[in-house]
Image (cartoon, rainbow, N blue to C red):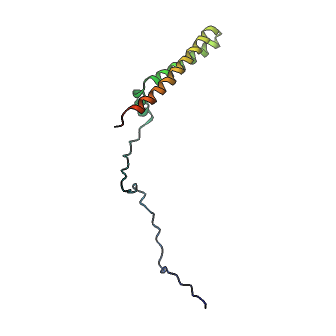
């Protein structure tokens, strides 16, 4: 009653096959892949985003300018001018945040091409 061990697979070397070709995306029925958007440099992306919402860079520059002049006035001992510039910085930061939020809503409402 000794059973002999026989393999159901013939003695041929197994070929390792990938389930799909990695050189192109898989073909899925009913699915159309999006075309790849060309890679853009930092400068190109910055210019595109600035054209979409120019108020964000303006607010950032206003914030940075008020901060730098406020710190300079504080270092020189001009406390009143320093306080006014720090309040201006807060206003510029608020303007920037509102510009970002407005840009998000405008982009969400814009129809897709």
User: Looking at the image, is 14 positioned above or below residue 30?
Assistant: below
User: Looking at the image, is 2 positioned above or below residue 71?
Assistant: below
Q: Evaluate whether residue 22 shows in this view.
A: yes
Q: Which of 97 and 36 is in front in this view?
A: 97
Q: Nearer the viewer, residue 75 or 24?
A: 24
Q: Where is residue 40 in the image (x, y as percent from the top left)?
A: 41, 38
Which quadrant of the structure image shows residue 17? bottom left
How many numbered badges does the structure rendering display? Answer: 0
Tell me which residue sits at (47%, 24%) in the image. 99
Check the image and name the residue furthest to the left.
113
Relative placement, left or right, of 46 versus 77 is left
Which quadrant of the structure image shows residue 71? top right
Q: Position of residue 59 (x, y in %)?
A: 49, 21
User: Looking at the image, is 102 positioned above or below residue 30?
Assistant: above
Q: Which of 54 and 113 is in front in this view?
A: 113
Quadrant housing the N terminus: bottom right
Q: Where is residue 88 in the image (x, y as percent from the top left)?
A: 55, 14
Tell me which residue sits at (42%, 24%) in the image. 54
Quadrant housing the C terminus: top left
Q: Evaluate whether residue 78 shows in this view.
A: no
Tell me which residue sits at (48%, 75%) in the image. 13
User: Looking at the image, is 32 positioned above or below residue 69?
Assistant: below
Relative placement, left or right, of 87 versus 59 is right
Tell me which residue sits at (38%, 32%) in the image. 110
């Amino acid at each position: 009653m000794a059973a002999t061990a026989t393999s159901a697979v013939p003695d041929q070397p197994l070929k390792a096959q990938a389930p799909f070709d990695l050189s192109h995306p898989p073909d899925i029925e009913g699915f159309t892949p999006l075309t790849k958007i060309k890679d853009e440099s930092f400068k190109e992306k910055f210019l595109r985003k600035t054209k979409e919402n120019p108020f964000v860079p303006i607010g950032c520059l206003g914030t940075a300018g008020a901060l730098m002049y406020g710190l300079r006035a504080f270092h020189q001992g001009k406390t009143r001018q320093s306080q006014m510039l720090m309040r201006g910085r807060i206003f510029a930061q608020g303007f920037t945040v509102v510009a970002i939020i407005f840009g998000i809503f405008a982009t969400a409402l814009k129809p897709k091409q």
